[in-house]
Amino acid sequence: MTVVSMDVSGAPVEGFLAVPDGGRGPGVLVVQEWWGLVPHIRSVVERLAEAGFVAMAVDHYRGIETTEPDEAEKLMMGLQVDAAAADLAAGADYLLSRAEVVGSSVGSIGFCMGGGLSLLAPTVGNVSSAVAFYPAMPWPDYQPQWDAYAGKAALVHKAESDEAHAGPRIAEYSAAILAAGGEVTVVDYPNSVHAFFNDDRPDVYQADNAALAWQRSIDFLDSHLR
């Protein structure tokens, strides 16, 4: 994995990039949780490369990361969704500019805050397929351009513990994607908790659910990007 730099609205922004052993593959954006580009997210970049994708995570927090929930919440709420959207659009363009990336569009995969941003990625950039793990969407005033989802697809992994607060927004987003002519699949994981995929957090990690969701994600990205 290497650190790369791309232009976002005239300013340099770093990202972590990993290329598969074969040297080429479809591009996938990895979108961070509210913690920042912590080791878990960097490991997802590497795992995607092992699965044959050219993967990259853009640094939305510009070098800041934390392990403290209160600080993470402040960082997430301080993130302007328009700025994050610009990062995603620039990240997609950067991936497509690289010789290692095949295809005319890229995919995205995100977790928690990044799950919400991943769902939005096809509305702001050259992203044709989005995976969202237990998405958090704390931007009630943001109005996505859902029409851009025509011919695109999304896969949502929903944690059972999130149903009360995230369920209605997931249903709202799903309906908007379908109305735009896109495809969306929402998968429920019985007895699952938020962040069940994060193997750096033994208090929430659920190995069986994580393995199942990962394989579904790889199959989804394979089917839409290859």
Image (tube, rainbow, N blue to C red):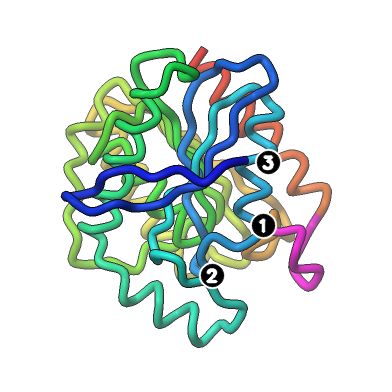
Sequence order check: which comes first, mark 1 or mark 2?
2
Q: CA distance from mark 1 to mark 2?
A: 10 Å
Residue at 30 percent across and 49 percent down: it is 87
Q: Which residue is mark 3?
A: 213
As displayed, is residue 195 above or below residue 7?
below
Q: Which residue is mark 2?
A: 35
Q: Does the magenta-highlighted stretch encompass residue 225? A: no
Q: Looking at the picture, how far across and down is residue 78, in whole percent?
A: 31, 76
Q: Which residues are magenta?
A: 198-206
Q: Amino acid at mark 2?
A: Trp
Mark 1 vs mark 3, foreground winner is 1
Q: CA distance from mark 2 to mark 3?
A: 21 Å
Horizontal side of residue 4 vs 89, given as left or right: right
Residue nearest the viewer, comparing 199 with 135: 199
Mark 2 vs mark 3, foreground winner is 2
Quadrant in the rendering for residue 47: top right
As displayed, is residue 90 above or below residue 103?
below
Horizontal side of residue 199 vs 216, given as left or right: right
Horizontal side of residue 134 vs 139, given as left or right: right
Secondary structure beneath disc 3? helix
Residue at 34 percent across and 15 percent down: it is 104
Q: Amino acid at mark 3?
A: Ala
Q: Which residue is mark 1?
A: 40
